[in-house]
Amino acid sequence: MTSTNPIPVRSKPRNLASAVVDHLTTRIKSDDLKVGEKLSTESEIMQVYGVSRTVVREAISQLKAAGLVETRHGIGTFVLAPSHHLGLQNSSIVTVRDVLAVLEIRISLETEAAWHAASRRTDTQIEEMRAVLQLMRATVESGAHSVDADVRFHLLIAQATGNPYFVELLGHLGHTLIPRARLNTAQLNQDDPSAYLVRVHHEHEDIFNAILRKDPEAARAAMRTHLSNSRERLRLAQEVIEGAG
């Protein structure tokens, strides 16, 4: 069971789930948490990190998506042996050109992931996607950023494929999945941020509805449209940056 090593106290952490994930990931990679070791219970993690149950579950979900832990129903969550990842490190993806390159990989991977998700998704996974979409809608309406919910939505699609390698690859990319997590493309394109987020949300709804209908071809097309639009927005942002240079 994990020891109680609290995360550094911050007055306003950027994202509580991400803070928990970052700290537990560090402990796993430093071998402070051993392979096969059982994590603390949800209640214990809540107490150690001073966060809600919802935050703990989101953090565990992200760790599972990254292939760092697995949950054995009725038993607990355990640290997995490290796997061999691609040489894609968040620290190396810093420019618009870098994110465009990652986006090309996303288009190849996620269009097929959407196809498989529409074929294989469960009712439970649909409800999880629906809940995340509702959260995204609420954040968009409030004018807040929805990057973490966006990442979660895409990882849920990967999970719905039933193929752990989709989950591992897309989970490893983490927040590099979402261009606006690194670049304010709306601002660079002199676009209205609210209108931009509404458009992105509608694109997500199109993907969800196709998966809901179990329509693989429509899901693939909707994902390709979404990612192609992201690529075009980024391409225009790159032109702005290079023009300013």
Image: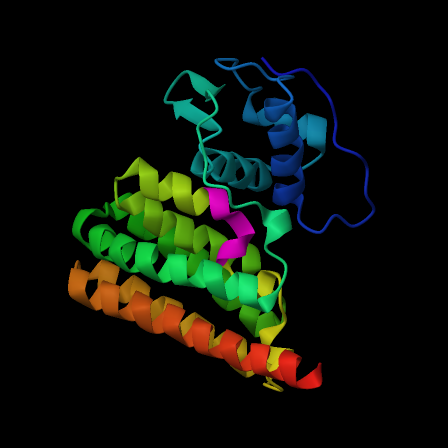
Q: In this rendered view, identify the residue nearer to me: 68 or 206.
A: 68
Q: In this rendered view, identify the residue nearer to me: 143 or 177.
A: 177
Q: Position of residue 92 (x, y in %)?
A: 61, 51
Q: Residue at horizontal 37%, vertical 57%?
A: 130
Q: Residue at horizontal 65%, vertical 79%?
A: 241
Magenta span main SS: helix
Q: Position of residue 10 (x, y in %)?
A: 81, 43
**Is 183 placed left or right of 236 in the picture?**
right
Residue 1 lies in quadrant: top right
- Residue 215 visible in this rendered orientation of the protein: no
Q: Is residue 100 above or below residue 25?
A: below
Instruction: Specify the color scheme.
Output: rainbow
Quadrant position of the C terminus in the picture: bottom right
Q: Position of residue 167 (x, y in %)?
A: 37, 41
Q: Tell whether position 175 is magenta.
A: yes
Q: Residue at horizontal 65%, vertical 86%?
A: 243
Q: Tell whether position 203 is magenta.
A: no
Q: Position of residue 12 (x, y in %)?
A: 78, 50
Residue 191 lies in quadrant: bottom right
Magenta-tinted stretch: 172-177
Q: Residue at horizontal 70%, vertical 31%?
A: 49
Q: How many marks?
A: 0
Residue 200 lies in quadrant: bottom left
**Is 5 placed left or right of 129 in the picture?**
right
- Residue 56 visible in this rendered orientation of the protein: yes
